[in-house]
Image: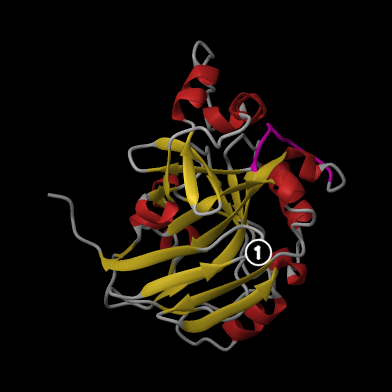
Amino acid sequence: MRFCRYDDDRYGVVQGDKVHDITAIVEKVLAGKKDPRWGDPMITHLDEVRKAVGDVSALPSKPVASVKLLSPTARPSKLIAAPTNYHAHVAEMSERKHERPASKGIAGSGLFLKANSAMVGPGEGVHIRFLDKLNEHELELLIVIGKVASEVSEDEALDYVAGYSLSLDMTVRGGEERSYRKSCDSYAVIGPWMVTKDEIADPNNVAFKHYVNGELRHDANSKDLIWNCQKLISEASKFYTLYPGDVIFTGAPAGVGPVKPGDVQTSECAAIGNMEVKVYAYKKPA
């Protein structure tokens, strides 16, 4: 199934070009249940939701193109990200002069966290906060955790997955720490929806492309990850307890490039879906 959140925090199942409203079903499943201290309630009870949803064809629906897509996970306890996890990206970043020395790969850097407040859905867009600095896109495969996980092995890691999405790890280039530069509001785009893990036989063989104003920037496949999905989950769980709805940005492939207000970013992935993300100039709230 393909689960989404949209418009005024409604829940939906995407089939073809329609989103079917399952908000009432989700609310019924969650009614009376204790709110988890950490993590996303809907994803915590995803198996129950799936059973309750059943056939969505009779449910109210709208064209996907007519709704505002939000992040499919509403309340992750943390956004975990993998730096320099493709050899080709390591190589391209090693040639950069405007940033602190690039790492030799993820093994030497470990993982980092992005602020939860950076998370948005594709319908909300990216809002560039520093127009005088280089802001770049990094399209990545995203893992959505489905069960509490701590110190799990690589062999069992995928048992803790709820599903997969696409993600834009937007970045302000500079010499500061990654978490600082990558945590601006709207710099963690997740979408277009979450595809449950049963629909993706091998997350380590997912092809995806990314365009800016029609120009191809990324043409990649997760088979080229240095740390594959199982390794990322296992390593993250050694340092943090993972909760339902937590996400792992798996790392950017080669082809990162600049974006500016007015640009339109388009991501394509046959296994997950396509999303469009517009770029705006940040405006301070009134």
Q: Quadrant of residue 146?
A: top right
* Amino acid carrying mark 1 in the image: Ser
- Residue 214 percent location from the top left of the image: 44, 82
Image position, residue 254 (x, y; %): 61, 79
* Colouring chosen for the image of the structure: secondary structure
Answer with left or right where residue 209 lies relative to residue 182.
Answer: right
Task: Indicate the quadrant where residue 222 lies.
Answer: bottom right
Left or right: residue 105 compared with residue 157? left
Q: Residue at x 35, y 43 (%)?
A: 7
- Residue 185 in view (yes/no): no
In this rendering, the answer to whether 50 lies above or below 184 is above
Q: Which residues fall within the magenta stretch?
A: 145-153
87 or 209: nearer the viewer: 209
The overriding secondary structure of the stretch rendered in magenta is loop
Residue found farthest to the left: 286
In the image, farthest residue toward the front? 58
User: Which residue is nearer to you in this view: 117 or 122?
Assistant: 122
Which element is circle 1 on? helix
Relative vertical location of residue 182 with respect to residue 161 in this rendering, above or below: below
Residue 284, image x, y percentages:
18, 56
Instruction: Using the rendered image of the protein, determine whether residue 152 is visible from the camera's viewpoint.
Output: yes
In which quarter of the view is residue 255 placed? bottom right
Q: Is residue 184 left or right of residue 44?
A: left
Residue, disc 1: 109
Instruction: Identify which residue, 281 or 184, lies in the foreground.
Output: 281
- In this view, which residue lies farthest toward the right? 155
Place of residue 205 in the rendered image (x, y in percent of width and height, measured from the top left): 76, 65
Residue at x-position 45% and y-position 84%: 98
Q: Residue at x 69, y 73 (%)?
A: 86
Determine the residue located farthest toward the top in the rendered image.
32
Label 1 packing within 10 angstroms: few (<14), some (14-19), many (20+): some
Magenta span has 114?
Answer: no
